[in-house]
């Protein structure tokens, strides 16, 4: 059995190098605006139809519109600055969050599947999400907001690397 530090590769934690595609900001904004519209549209319609309750329906609609619009402008920019990802020969690294940062590291030897997903809005913005599934109880590692061509190349690369990486015996 090797002594401590002998024969083992040391992995150093450092911020992942890659940013998401800049189109992800618009994608997140549209998602946020659609989520805001879900409660606002019925409130506005009911406010237009029910005159005695108009004020009590349109007031929350206006508040939700202002809050949702502000969040749609600011949050995606903030998220874009904090989300990072990187793939090395040893692992997939993803960092998300600002106040509560989360680092997810999936060693290549633990990867079970690699999926690429493109929902309707992602297709509109030419983006994709790569999901790396491991046996972790925390769930899959997701890299959202990648250019769809980069996502396809990344999925191919991860598949090739994991195929050539021996499984972990532990």
Image (cartoon, grey):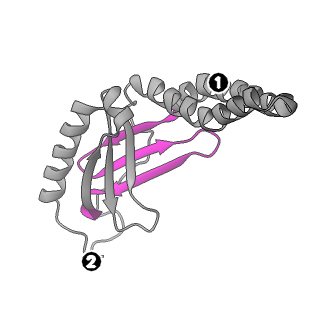
- Compare marks 1 and 2 and give the one earlier in the sequence: 2
Q: Quadrant of the C terminus?
A: bottom left
Residue 147, given in percent of the width and then of the height, sits at 29, 29
**Residue to which mark 1 is pinned:** 69
Residue 158 located within the stretch drawn in magenta: no
| Above or below for 100 versus 145 | below
Q: Residues within 10 Å of mark 1 (few under 14, many from 20)?
A: some
Assign a secondary structure to mark 2.
loop
| Above or below for 123 versus 9 | above
What residue is at 44 percent from the left and 42 percent from the top?
14
Query: What numbered label is drawn on residue 1?
Result: 2
Q: Is residue 70 left or right of residue 50?
A: left
Query: What numbered label is drawn on residue 166?
Result: none
What residue is at 50 percent from the left and 33 percent from the top?
31
Q: Residue 66: which quarter of the image?
A: top right
Q: Residues within 10 Å of mark 2 (few under 14, many from 20)?
A: few
| Above or below for 69 versus 145 | above
Residue 70, given in percent of the width and then of the height, sits at 67, 24
Q: Which residues are magenta?
A: 82-111
* Pointers 1 and 2 in contact (C-beta within 8 Å): no
The one nearer the camera, 154 or 58, is 58
Q: Is residue 146 visible?
A: no
- Find the distance from the CA under tag 1 to the CA under tag 2: 60 Å
The one nearer the camera, 147 or 38, is 38
């Amino acid at each position: 059995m090797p002594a401590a530090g002998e024969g083992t590769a040391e992995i150093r934690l450092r911020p992942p190098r890659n940013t998401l595609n800049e189109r992800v900001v618009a994608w997140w904004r549209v998602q946020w605006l659609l989520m805001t519209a879900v409660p606002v549209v019925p409130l506005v319609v009911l406010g237009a139809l029910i005159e005695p309750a108009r004020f009590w329906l349109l007031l929350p609609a206006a508040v939700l519109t202002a809050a949702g619009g502000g969040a749609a402008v600011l949050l995606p920019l903030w998220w874009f600055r904090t989300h990072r990802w990187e793939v090395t020969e040893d692992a997939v690294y993803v960092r998300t969050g600002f106040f509560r940062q989360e680092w997810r590291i999936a060693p290549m030897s633990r990867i079970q599947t690699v999926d690429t997903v493109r929902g309707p809005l992602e297709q509109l913005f030419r983006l994709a999400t790569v999901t790396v599934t491991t046996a972790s109880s925390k769930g899959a590692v997701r890299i959202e907001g990648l250019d769809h061509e980069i996502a396809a190349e990344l999925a191919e690369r991860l598949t090739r690397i994991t195929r050539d990486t021996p499984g972990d015996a532990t």
